[in-house]
Image: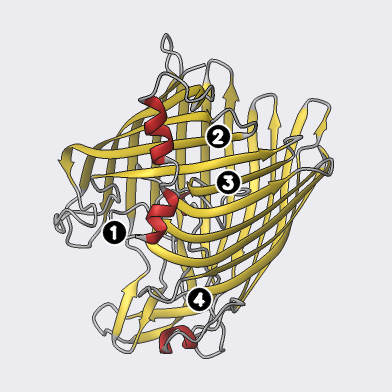
């Protein structure tokens, strides 16, 4: 409750201001009021083979409305508040909370939420921003901290952040995160986490990013997690003779969180020890898009004292296939080698296809068809083909349409212990049809 009250600090300011048209003692409560919103209807089909469930058909719509304004004639002081609702139009699917467990999952439960409520203060000459309250946070490519915007309800963070750009081409960010609201309609989680982030743009050919994400759950939560992830990323967008390149080279190490890790036995037992790297090269050749990527998340044999590399607050849908088979890293880790090919042109939209081959870092169990016990080991985690087409809808400003498809083919690896094993995903097919309309006042 305390965390929710802190995040809602902007609510009475905005609502109270909207109801007052006059100023008090010559001070305007609100200035420069702006409204923005989004309406996003979507159909999602999900079918997991041989899992005794029926295929899911979900018709949902996301509605967002936000209001921002300058406050009290104080230079640099402003507030923003936003509400988001997700409604089920029709269909049968397991939202994880609607009781329809006989159907495959589409994690878009019906709910309404205060998704953002924060106050900003920009310190002259506007090179330092202080933001406090509930907010949507997307850092870098969202591999570690993201809003999971693909789901109808997105992830938000209760945080206090400072961003500074005093030094030319250098952006520094520090934040204390005390809570998070996920995509499900489950109770929020209290956190005791810290974000440290720095980016220096040398030129278009080189950006240098360094970060440290100290993520830990609070003492009064049933979820036990803690890690300190620090890393370095080099990115750039060089162009040569009409060919636009983009690249990413990144490495991160994950160790125990440098916070109190003795809350209870479950916390004490968690000892993070893992690493990560990501190598990506892409090109735009007169609208033809090509790229190769290799992403590595280390794993454990279960007896080596290691842990699998974890990204609990990432926008996971962006990585390792759109079928969402690897939102959590397998015990044996994950190696994702993928290639992409597409085309993008004004008026024609964007078409992109991606093929993934998944293997584990450490061999995992193979389970006999009827035996229920391990019959060997393998690193085969399957493969996936994804394709998407997105374009603006002619005649309607700010309206886009999307068609998307993902097909995952399972590998031979299983995950579990003793005589209880979990297949690492049966074959799965997912398809989407979506419209997205955004609007705002000037």
Q: Residue at x 69, y 24 (%)?
A: 286
Can residue 101 be seen from the camera position used here? yes
Crowding around mark 3 (Cα neighbors within 10 Å: few <14, some 14 to 19, many 20+) is: many
**In x, y percent, where is residue 203?**
84, 39
> Considering only order in the chain, which callout, 1 or 4, is on the residue closer to the N terminus?
1
Residue 169 quadrant: top right
Which numbered marker is on residue 186? 1
In the rendered view, would you say 158 is above or below 391?
below
Q: Which secondary structure lies at badge 1?
A: loop
Instruction: Choose the circle earlier in sequence order: 3 or 2.
Output: 2
Point 44% across, 50% down: residue = 7
**How far is the residue under mark 3 from the one under mark 2?**
10 Å
Is 432 displayed left or right of 392 in the figure? left
Residue 44 image point, x, y percent: 29, 40
- Mark pair 4, 1: CA separation: 29 Å
Query: Would you say 316 lies left or right of 227 here?
Result: left
In whole angstroms, how far apart are the C-alphas of marks 4 and 2? Answer: 47 Å
For the residue labelled by badge 2, is the local secondary structure a helix, a strand or a loop?
strand
Other residues around mark 4 within 10 Å, as few (<14) / some (14–19) / many (≥20):
many
Q: Which residue is mark 4?
A: 332
Find disc 2 in the rendering and name its residue: 78
**Nearest to N terminus: mark 3 or mark 1:** 3
Q: Nearer the viewer, mark 4 or mark 3?
A: 3
Instruction: Please state if 12 lies on the left or on the right of 112 as rendered.
Output: right
Q: Which mark is residue 293?
A: none
């Amino acid at each position: 409750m305390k965390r929710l009250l802190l995040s809602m600090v902007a609510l009475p300011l905005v609502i109270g201001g909207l109801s007052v048209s006059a100023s008090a003692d010559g001070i305007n409560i609100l200035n420069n009021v702006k409204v923005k919103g989004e309406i996003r209807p979507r159909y999602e089909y999900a079918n997991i083979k041989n899992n005794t469930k029926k295929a899911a058909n979900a018709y949902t719509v996301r509605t967002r409305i936000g209001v921002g304004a300058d406050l009290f004639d104080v230079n640099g002081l402003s507030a923003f508040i936003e509400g988001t609702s997700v409604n089920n139009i029709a269909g049968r699917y397991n939202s994880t909370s609607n009781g329809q467990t006989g159907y495959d999952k589409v994690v878009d439960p019906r709910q309404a939420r205060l998704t953002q409520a924060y106050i900003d203060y920009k310190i002259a000459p506007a090179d330092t921003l202080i933001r406090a309250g509930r907010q949507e946070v997307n850092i870098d490519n969202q591999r570690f901290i993201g809003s999971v915007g693909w789901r109808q309800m997105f992830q938000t963070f209760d945080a206090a952040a400072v961003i500074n750009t005093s030094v030319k081409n250098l952006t520094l960010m520090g934040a204390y995160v005390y809570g998070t609201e996920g995509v499900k309609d489950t109770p929020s989680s209290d956190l005791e986490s810290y974000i440290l982030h720095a980016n220096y743009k040398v030129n278009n050919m080189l950006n240098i990013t360094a970060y440290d994400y100290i993520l830990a759950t609070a003492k009064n939560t049933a979820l036990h997690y803690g890690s300190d992830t620090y890393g370095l990323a080099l990115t750039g967008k060089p162009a040569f003779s009409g060919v636009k390149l983009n690249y990413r080279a990144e490495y991160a190490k994950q160790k125990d969180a440098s916070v109190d890790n003795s809350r209870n036995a479950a916390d004490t037992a968690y000892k993070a020890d893992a690493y990560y790297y990501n190598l990506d090269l892409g090109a735009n050749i007169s609208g033809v898009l090509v790229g190769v990527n290799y992403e590595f998340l280390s794993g454990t044999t279960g007896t080596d004292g290691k842990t699998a590399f974890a990204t609990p607050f990432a926008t996971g849908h962006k990585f390792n296939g759109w079928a969402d088979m690897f939102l959590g890293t397998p015990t044996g880790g994950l190696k994702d080698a993928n290639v992409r090919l597409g085309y993008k042109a004004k008026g024609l939209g964007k078409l992109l296809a991606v093929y993934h081959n998944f293997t584990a870092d450490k061999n995992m169990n193979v389970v006999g068809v009827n035996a229920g016990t391990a019959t060997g080991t393998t690193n085969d985690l399957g493969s996936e083909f994804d394709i998407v087409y997105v374009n603006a809808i002619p005649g309607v400003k700010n309206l886009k349409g999307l068609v998307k498809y993902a097909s995952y083919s399972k590998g031979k690896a299983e995950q579990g212990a003793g005589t209880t094993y979990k297949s690492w995903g049966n074959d799965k097919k997912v398809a989407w049809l979506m419209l997205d309309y955004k609007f705002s006042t000037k």
